[in-house]
Image (cartoon, rainbow, N blue to C red):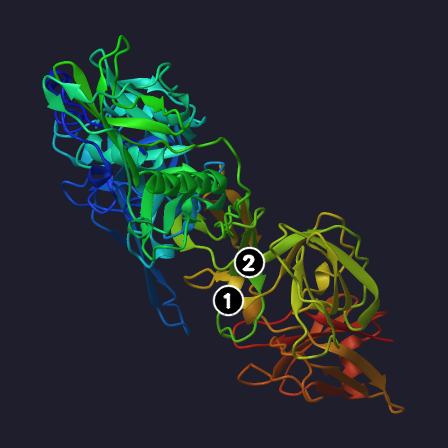
Amino acid sequence: MATLVLTAIGSAIGGPAGGAIGSILGQQIDRALFAPKSREGPRLKELDVQTSSYGTSIPAIFGVMRAAGTVIWATDLVERRIKNGSGKGRPATVNYSYSVSMAVAISSRPLARIGRIWADGNLLRGENGDLKVDGELRIYQGYDNQHCDPLMASAEATGQCSAYRGLAYAVFEDLQLADFGNRIPSLTFEIFEREDPVPVAAIFEAASGGLIVGSSSQAVMGYALSGADARDGLAPLIDVFSLDMSCRDGQLLIADVNSVAALPSPLVPVYLDDNRQFDAPLQKREPASLASRSVSLRYYDKTRDFQAGIQRSERGNNSRTSMQIELAAVLSASEAKMLAEHYNLGIHCDRSTWNAQVSLSRQRLFVGDRFVEPSGVTWRIEQIEHGLGSLAISARLAPDIGARTLAVDPGRGLPAPDIGAGQTRIAIIDLPVFNLSDPARQQIAVFAAGTGRGWRRAALSLTDGDALNDIGPTALPAVMGNAVSILTAHNNLFVDRTSSLEVQLLNTGMDIAEMDMSVSSANAPFFWLQGEFIRFGRCTALGGARFRLSHFQRGCFGSDAYAANHLVGDRFVLLDADSARLLDGPDKDPGTIITVEALGIADDVPAIASLSVSALATTPLSPVHGTAFRSSDGDLSLAWKRRSRIDFGWRDGVDQPLVEDVERYHVTMLSDGVPVSEWALNEPALLIPSAELFQLAGLGNEIVLSIRHVGNHSVSAPHFVAVT
């Protein structure tokens, strides 16, 4: 709201500012000069768009601000190829990932720290300093003693890398771009030059190199000083804030409007000076239609993650014109509303002018001084012209700005969620034929998740002797946790309708759908519990990422040996094909030890899991329900039921698909533990005549028949049937 004329000291102190302040001194700084229509200072959108062009101005940040910055150095995109598959029965696929290293200038003055960082509007770095994607970040605060960045120095010729002293910037090394469409995202930074609000007077003093001094009770939470020179950067503050600027004793001073007291003595009009006649004091008032009816102020609102806010002031009904001004400052909604009201009030006060010739007095008059007419109206001096024995004074009506607080709704904010990734947890599981996976290949999979809701993926490495081979990222986060109740043993041939299991998942972002269905349904899901595969039909949510599961089919897919008691703390994984990261390469021999390491973005040390291969997916299940019957003439009839290693649920009441090319069995007779005969069969039955049985078994006290299912790749575990 400051308008003034400086005529005497423009050339005296304008030079040292080098054009930064010289354009202010020695000319009228009025509303036409500082009006938004003609100003070339920063606009709010300029702080939201990342640039990389030569000649782009880098703002000087005061207080707390969110700004985009300028890319000052970058590498080409780095492409990585990861080949998956190519084994028997599985097509080869090649996945590409891209990363980039770059430096982004943030502020042209030193800063204290960097808070959050947004990439395309989503959080890239959280409040606690955790990056949400893979990469490394280094911050240079802009002090005069900072050193060159080692990555930039290694890429540049010797002695050619700048330390960018006096410039605060951030260096991203190997920033992964998969989450941004494999392109460099638009970055914005939460910049802390200081934690406390910044007095407006301090911004003037810093921007002018100490040429403008004073005091002000007005402050902003943050401000971005930008433009061709300091005049452009300070013009928005002059425009919007209730400030008086004056020149006294060769010094340019700034002060709050309310702090400037009225002159103690009234001005005395002069009607004759040096034989010149002057008119009486003249007051004029421009038509209200020439003033704007409404003023809109756009600003940054910290409560809404520094998104642009707007507050409007409306005054009078005699004009249809409106004005919008932009202030690259961080304000509260109430502060912005008050500034808009004060600005609009100033526009209407400027309609009233006072002009007169007054006598010289002992008190020196300065532009910015106030005086009170006998009628009680307060005027502010805008121009002084010295005569021989008098002064020509031009003044405008001084606005009466009171200190008050307005209750204003800042509007609804939609902040980007700041969710921590937590620590990585993994399980390596030898899977059976699961869903539509290839029944001719082993299915060894890594399931991974994090203790925090923000966990998305981790980098996997496979141990090969003393070496670690990078095998790419994990799949989608798995639903994982631990048992918080005991699950007792149960016969795997019968449905367990009495037991239940409570599990605590790793984080509250995980979920298991509540259900109540038959465990034999094709839609009944599976979970893995410390080696045992269990199908379940009922789930109840208990709150806090805790669930109760029941109605079980135990020991599925040949995991009978693990269908024992399960204790509190046993690992739990809900089986889902989308969260299974299958390991590639040739099939492993049973008994081979596989060790995998996973390193997430928030992990200090990798998560490690090992597995002894059992090749569940390619190994037939052992037969069940074996019976031995002796007829009256002594013949032995042996029968059993086969099982399929594919289990899609009992859909139609008939047998499951065989999967193997041919139905084959291998039966061994043991007498007192010693093998005495073998049979290769193509049906689940065997008849041994009494004479042959006596010849083979002799007078053995114990006769046991071992039945194995012969598959395409291996044979099942034996199913024993005792003969009395």
- Amino acid beneath label 2: Val
In the rendered image, which residue does mark 1 sit on?
Answer: 442
Contact (Cβ within 8 Å) of mark 2 with mark 1: yes
Give x and y (percent) for residue 426.
55, 50
On screen, 51 above or below 676? above
Callout 1 crowding tier (Cα within 10 Å): few <14, some 14–19, many ≥20: many
Judged from this view, the residue extending furthest toward the top is: 362
Q: Where, by quadrant of the figure, is residue 3 drawn? A: top left
* Left or right of 416, for residue 576: right
Give x and y (percent) for residue 82.
33, 58
Can residue 674 be seen in the rendering of this structure?
yes
Q: Residue at x 62, y 55 (%)?
A: 480
On screen, 585 above or below 15? below
Q: Where, by quadrant of the figure, is residue 359 drawn? A: top left
Label 2: state its secondary structure: loop
Q: Nearer the viewer, residue 571 or 33?
A: 33
Label 1: state its secondary structure: loop
- Amino acid beneath label 1: Gln
In the rendered image, which residue does mark 2 sit on?
Answer: 613
Q: Nearer the viewer, residue 218 or 382?
A: 382
Q: Nearer the viewer, residue 380 or 510?
A: 380
Can residue 191 be seen in the rendering of this structure?
no
